[in-house]
Image (cartoon, grey):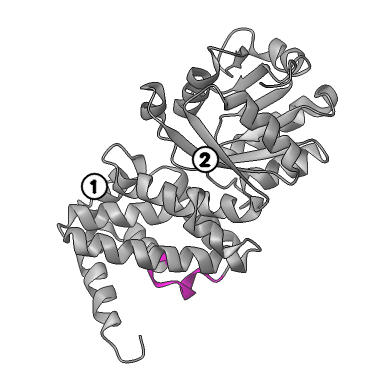
């Protein structure tokens, strides 16, 4: 059972994931749900935050810093701030980094894995890695979800699973491109293996553990996002292959733009990541770009 004060929960944001978290917790927690575009929004955020044991930031990563700053010293020292956001902000920071910089020593956690919101609201099983620096915080959040259909596994690798969550949305678009081009199941198998190899290498470069790429926040969420017909990023990939007019919006395109703008790592070292960037730059050349990538694989030094 959760601690009595942890059962008092604030959910910030009511997009798809916010609604899913609400569905999971509503039967056994005392919820307050804050939305920016409500008449009393300006007067309720801080007072509500003062009363709860757990705060969920169910908003895009670029909104985290401003909202966390507004909470300021209002949070109790042991209130846990949890984010399921899977993008980068406009400075190229992960959600964990934005919360950490804005909230200092406040307990924080990230929640990443196969968590399709529609399936959660249909009471189907969902799975996530909960990343925290302190296992006690993970245990408190796990207790909060224990009566629900969401199953959690703790990891200390906050950086690793954060980058898995960011990058799987980028790579998922390539699966949509391949499906729209009719390249078949064999291509999907190749993309899965090669994506995981690149993901593990990038995560290691950025200070994470390579094994995170093969667990819930990496492989688990990649399969979910890259193969589900209901996935936004899979659909984006299909739209790219059809050369539909942009802009192509979502956490994946924004994250890749921030990686390129801020040079967060040497992204051109990774062939599939580079292929996604090229297709985003020239959607009408998608088939030719994929063909060129496959041709390059035939070269003796590839």
Whole-percent x, y for residue 244 in the image: 23, 47
Q: Vertical placement of 268 versus 117: above or below?
A: below
Task: Verify whether residue 235 appears in magenta.
Answer: no
Look at 29% across and 50% down and name the residue there: 237
* Region in magenta: 266-273
Looking at the rendering, in which quadrant would you find the N terminus? top right
Tell whether label 1 touches label 2 (CB within 8 Å): no
Q: 36 or 19: which is nearer to us?
A: 19
**Residue 3 visible:** yes
Examine the image and state in which quarter residue 36 appears.
Answer: top right
User: Residue under circle 1?
Assistant: 244
Q: Earlier in the sequence, mark 2 or mark 1?
A: 2
Examine the image and state in which quarter residue 205 appears.
Answer: bottom right
Q: Residues within 10 Å of mark 1 (few under 14, many from 20)?
A: few
Q: Vertical placement of 97 versus 22: above or below?
A: below
Q: How far apart are the two marked residues, 2 and 1, measured between alpha carbons? A: 33 Å
The reply, left or right, for residue 21 in relation to residue 173 is right
Look at 53% across and 12% down and name the residue there: 27
Q: 242 or 87: which is nearer to us?
A: 87
Please tell me whether mark 2 or mark 1 is closer to you in this view. Answer: 2
Assign a secondary structure to mark 1.
Answer: loop
Q: Vertical placement of 48 versus 297: above or below?
A: above
In the rendering, which numbered label is found on residue 17? none
Whole-percent x, y for residue 96 in the image: 66, 44
User: Residue under circle 2?
Assistant: 128
Task: Verify whether residue 270 appears in magenta.
Answer: yes
Q: 68 or 139: which is nearer to us?
A: 139
């Amino acid at each position: 059972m959760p601690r009595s004060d942890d059962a008092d929960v604030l959910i910030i944001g009511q997009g798809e994931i916010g609604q899913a978290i609400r569905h999971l917790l509503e039967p056994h927690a005392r919820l307050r749900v804050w939305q920016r575009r409500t008449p009393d929004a300006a007067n309720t955020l801080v007072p509500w935050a003062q009363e709860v044991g757990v705060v969920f930031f169910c908003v895009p990563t670029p909104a985290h810093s401003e909202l966390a700053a507004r909470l300021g010293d209002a949070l109790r020292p042991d209130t846990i701030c949890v984010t399921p956001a899977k993008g980068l902000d406009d400075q190229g920071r992960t959600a964990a980094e934005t919360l950490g910089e804005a909230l200092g020593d406040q307990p924080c956690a990230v929640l990443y894995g196969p968590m399709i919101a529609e399936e959660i609201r249909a009471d189907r099983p969902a799975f996530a890695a909960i990343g925290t620096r302190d296992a006690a915080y993970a245990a408190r959040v796990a207790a909060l979800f224990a009566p629900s259909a969401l199953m959690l596994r703790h990891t200390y690798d906050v950086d690793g699973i954060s980058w898995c969550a960011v990058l799987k949305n980028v790579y998922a678009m390539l699966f949509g491109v391949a499906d729209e081009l009719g390249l078949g199941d064999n291509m999907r198998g190749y993309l899965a293996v090669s994506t995981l190899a690149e993901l593990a290498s990038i995560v290691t470069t950025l200070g994470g553990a390579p094994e995170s790429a093969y667990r819930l926040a990496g492989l688990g969420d990649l399969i979910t996002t890259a193969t589900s017909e209901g996935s936004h990023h899979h659909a984006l990939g299909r739209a790219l292959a059809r050369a539909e007019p942009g802009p192509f919006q979502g956490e994946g395109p924004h994250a890749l733009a921030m990686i390129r703008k801020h040079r967060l790592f040497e992204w051109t070292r990774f062939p599939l990541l580079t292929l996604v960037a090229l297709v985003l730059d020239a959607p009408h050349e998608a088939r030719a770009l994929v063909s060129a990538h496959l041709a390059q694989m035939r070269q003796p030094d590839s």
